[in-house]
Image: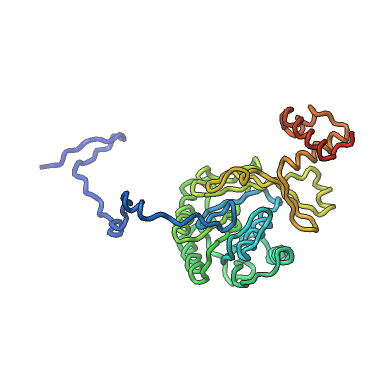
Amino acid sequence: MKPFNSKNLAGIETSSSVVPLRPNSEWSAIKPLTYEDIVNSAPKPMEYVLYPWLPKQGIAFIYAATGVGKTLFTLNVAYAIASGGTFLKYRAQKPRKVLYIDGEMSYIQVYSRFMQIVGQQGELDYKENFQLLTPEKSPLKLPRICSPQGQEFYNQLIKERDIEVLVLDNLSMLSAIDESNSEQWKVIQDWLIELRARGITVIIVHHAGKDKKGYRGTSRMLDCADTAISLQDVSSDQLENEITNTKKFKIEYHKARAFGGKDSFPFEVSLTKFGWEYQSMEQNNVHRIAEMLNMGIKQHEIAKELVLSRPYICKLVKKARATGLLTD
């Protein structure tokens, strides 16, 4: 007896005698947790690699336009984690082993920035806690993180060196995917989730998109992320900035799964010859408004220039007067 034939939506004849796929023998190990399993397996309290935005086993993205300072910022973050120290308003709970993979800069640039950080944060107590992979110091081309062979290479390196935190700087240079293609991104995303399951914390450095505040690529890129940090240039006069040798940018959190409240507020940072400084965006606006008022600019013009509401401007003017910033 012939099997009954029907047509699918495309009009192609199909047989009802479908041969079932052979199940993967390893899948038998995948089982859902029961109520008792959940109740009796309370996890440990959340541990932070860098408080408040990077939990242990977390996945974080840091993105910015070219020249804003994303590598310098991330190197400082990585060094603070390796030392168990602090950077800006962030603090590490304990020293951890960090593998920093840089795929873009020349070694002389990496070295210069690294030694600047050593001078600011101090030498490491555990010298093996910061390890660097960079093309110029490698006898072979660094493997791509989007290939099975590349992922296996880094998996083995992480295991051999007891690495706890992996920093990938940056996504574009260390992979060969079409960043706007969600299916190609999934190859890297699956690996990031696998690393998290193995207890590894990952920081990915990426480029900003056309609007400078967002990132470049598919909207699915942040699906598995715990934290997304946008670094935005706030220099009003680039020439003056170069003369004073000051780098300024705003830190804004676009995703904050493990923290909130005041910890998630944006703030402004600056690097001068005296080191890193930071202040809230409101503090920064108070100073900017005071300077503009002292120059004779009207409040409604300031509101338009800074894209702030008139009531908010009035509030900050009161703060400026209370702190003696206004000359009138």
Q: Is residue 23 left or right of residue 233?
A: left
Q: Is the image coloured rainbow, by chain, by secondary structure, or in one colour?
A: rainbow
Q: At 30% across and 34% down in the image, what residue appears?
A: 9
Residue 5 lies, with reference to residue 143, above or below; the image says above
Q: Is residue 1 left or right of residue 139?
A: left
- The quarter of the displayed image where residue 289 is located: top right
Viewer-closest of 149 and 57: 57
Measured from the top left, where is residue 44 in percent x and y?
46, 57
Viewer-closest of 323 and 154: 323
- The quarter of the displayed image where residue 22 is located: bottom left
Measured from the top left, where is residue 127 in percent x and y?
62, 72
Q: At 45% across and 61% down in the image, what residue appears?
A: 198
**Can the viewer see residue 265?**
yes
Residue 62 lies, with reference to residue 79, above or below; the image says above
The residue most toward the front is: 322
Residue 193 lies, with reference to residue 163, above or below; the image says above
Quadrant of the frame with the N terminus: top left
The residue most toward the right is: 328
Q: Is residue 241 left or right of residue 76?
A: right
Viewer-closest of 267 and 249: 267
- The quarter of the displayed image where residue 262 is located: top right
Measured from the top left, where is residue 230 in percent x and y?
63, 46
Quadrant of the frame with the C terminus: top right
Q: At 76% across and 39% down in the image, what residue appears?
A: 285
Q: Is residue 114 left or right of residue 5?
A: right
Measured from the top left, where is residue 184 in percent x and y?
48, 50
**Can the viewer see residue 209?**
no
